[in-house]
Image: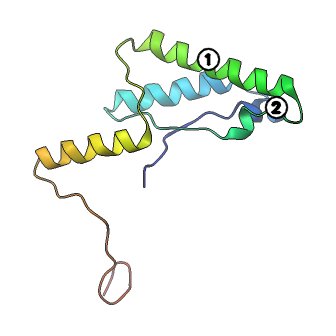
């Protein structure tokens, strides 16, 4: 399971104010500062316009603004899919001698302890 460490939900800006682009940029910067990939969580509700076409235009416009800001701040950034990122992590782990594989529950079915 890939942990998402950045949040981009412009629909929440409409509901409660705020700047989703700036907030997500801070989270991306934090991730990169610590040498981690920025895995951005966003929901399709931000980009659909079945009820209100203006809502769709707003969400897509803010997404464009976010992506442009990321490229401006980190010109050598890579955009990859979650499966591609997972494969990159596994390849790096194998190169470091770390075994990657499915987690298995303890034989007694309990997590931790005895």
Residue appearing at x 71%, y 30% in the figure:
10
First in sequence: mark 2 vs mark 1: 2
Mark on residue 64? 1
Q: Nearer the viewer, residue 113 or 100?
A: 100
Which residue position holds label 2? 49
Residue appearing at x 62%, y 15% in the figure:
65
Residue appearing at x 27%, y 40% in the figure:
88
Q: Is residue 2 left or right of residue 57?
A: left
Quadrant assignment for the N terminus: bottom left
Q: Classify mark 1: residues with Cα within 10 Å, few (<14), some (14-19) or many (20+).
A: few
**Image spot of residue 22 (x, y percent):** 61, 21
**Image spot of residue 42 (x, y percent):** 61, 38
Q: Nearer the viewer, mark 2 or mark 1?
A: 2
Badge 2 marks a residue whose secondary structure is loop
Q: Is residue 109 above or below residue 95?
A: below
Q: Nearer the viewer, residue 79 or 18?
A: 79
| Quadrant of res 30 | top left
């Amino acid at each position: 399971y890939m942990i998402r460490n950045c949040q981009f939900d412009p629909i929440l800006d409409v509901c409660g104010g705020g700047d989703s682009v700036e907030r997500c940029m801070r989270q991306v910067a934090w991730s990169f500062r610590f040498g981690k990939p920025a895995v951005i969580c966003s929901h399709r509700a931000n980009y659909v316009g079945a009820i209100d076409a203006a809502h769709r235009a707003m969400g897509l416009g803010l997404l464009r603004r976010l992506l442009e800001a990321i490229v401006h701040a980190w010109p050598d950034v890579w955009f990859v899919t979650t499966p591609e990122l997972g494969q990159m992590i596994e390849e790096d782990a194998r190169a470091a001698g770390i075994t990657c594989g499915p987690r298995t529950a303890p034989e007694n079915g309990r997590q931790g302890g005895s």
